[in-house]
Amino acid sequence: AAYLSSELEKLLFLKPGIVSLVPTGNSIVLQKNMRIVPEGYSLKVSSSGIVISASTAAGAFYGIQSLKTLLPPSSWKAKQQAIPVQAVEVVDAPRFGYRIAEFPAQGRNPKSAGRDEPLQAECTPSSLFG
């Protein structure tokens, strides 16, 4: 919630508040939903507000990123009183329970004994960030 508030502060004249009460009117709700797979999220934008549901912090982060892509480019030019967002429903989750990246490394995998195969390396938070 703090991350979303700080991101919206860049676009709005006032920093949005964070409350744990039941929202009313135009509000953005971050809610925990344990039925959503880890890193998955649901984003619903309607006339009654915005709801991002996720089971993990990573899922909420990805939902916030998707919400940011829905903001019109003009909203990033200067601070606004309000920002219109198109109504949409998005449900997204990783296809696989792991992440992998391909690194071409001169087009060959050292383990491939001369065959032309891409090098693959597993990407985990610890391998990416030390």
Image: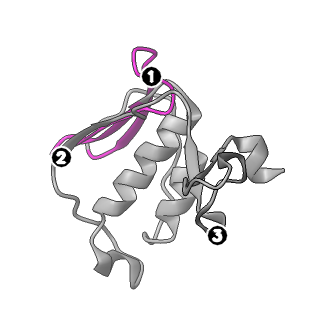
Q: Which label was assigned to residue 106?
A: 3
Counting from the top left corner in percent of width and height, residue 115 is at: 58, 53
User: Who is closer to the viewer here, 13 or 10?
Assistant: 10
Q: Quadrant of residue 53?
A: top left
The residue located at (53%, 54%) in the rendering is 5
Q: Is residue 105 left or right of residue 14?
A: right
Q: Which label was assigned to residue 88?
A: 2
Q: Contact (CB < 8 A) between labels 1 and 3?
A: no
SS of the residue under disc 2: strand
User: Who is closer to the viewer here, 67 or 130?
Assistant: 130
Magenta range is 26-53
Q: Name which residue type carries label 1.
A: Val
Q: Quadrant of residue 72?
A: bottom left
Using the numbered discs, state the Cα–Cα distance from disc 3 to disc 2 in whole angstroms.
Answer: 43 Å
User: Who is closer to the viewer here, 37 or 25?
Assistant: 37
Q: Residues within 10 Å of mark 2 (few under 14, many from 20)?
A: few
The residue located at (51%, 49%) in the rendering is 17
Q: Name which residue type carries label 3.
A: Gln
Looking at the image, the residue that sits furthest to the bottom is 77
Q: Is residue 124 left or right of residue 73?
A: right
Counting from the top left corner in percent of width and height, residue 118 is at: 56, 55
